[in-house]
Image (tube, rainbow, N blue to C red):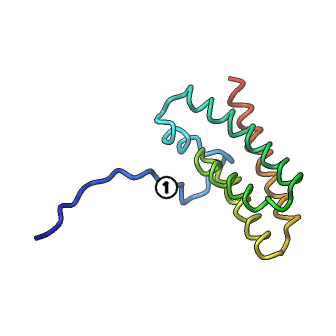
Amino acid sequence: MTPELQRMDWMPSPPLAPIDSPLDLDHLSRMTLGDAELEQEVLAMFAEQAAGLLAAMVAVPAEAGALAHKLKGSARGIGAFVVADAAARLETAIRTGHDRPRAFAALKEAVAEVRAVIAAILKH
């Protein structure tokens, strides 16, 4: 007897090719089911959360790895793959003890870029 196969709809993967913007709006749209109001709300929450997590990393350096991990997940959820990648690099730097200041600076820059894009989107 063969088991029945059941079709499951999976969430789409991030793009394999780089995109021009630090924020993948197609991914965000898929994650919010095309609900423009929800997109705006999610973007505003992410911008605030990202700034708060960066501040917390400075205030409590011992927690930076866990905070970077949290930021990485949130960034992937909205399509801020530049931030997610930078957060992953910071996690690795913390774990290995190599280039932590450089990785943190890169994360701060990535967050600033995404927050600028979000601010421009929310103005409209």
111 lies above or below 95 = above
Residue tagged 1: 13
- Residue sitting nearer the eye, 67 or 112: 67
95 lies above or below 58 = below
Which residue is located at x 54 percent, y 28 percent?
36
Which residue is located at x 88 percent, y 64 percent?
101
* Amino acid under disc 1: Ser
- Horizontal side of residue 13 vs 81, given as left or right: left
- Count of marks placed on residues: 1
Q: Looking at the rendering, in which quadrant would you find the N terminus? A: bottom left
- Horizontal side of residue 13 vs 97, given as left or right: left
Residue 124 in the image, given as x and y percentages of width and height? 68, 23
Q: Quadrant of residue 41?
A: top right
Residue 5 in the image, given as x and y percentages of width and height? 21, 60
Which residue is located at x 83 percent, y 75 percent?
97
- Residue sitting nearer the eye, 81 or 87: 87
Q: Quadrant of residue 2?
A: bottom left
110 lies above or below 95 = above
Residue 19 in the image, given as x and y percentages of width and height? 62, 51
Outermost residue to the top: 124
Residue 98 in the image, given as x and y percentages of width and height? 83, 75
Within 10 Å of the Cα at label 1, are there few (<14), some (14-19), or many (20+) other Cα atoms? few
Q: Quadrant of residue 85?
A: bottom right
27 lies above or below 121 = below
- Horizontal side of residue 74 vs 99, given as left or right: left
- Residue sitting nearer the eye, 110 or 19: 110
Q: Is mark 1 on a helix, strand or loop?
A: loop
Outermost residue to the left: 1
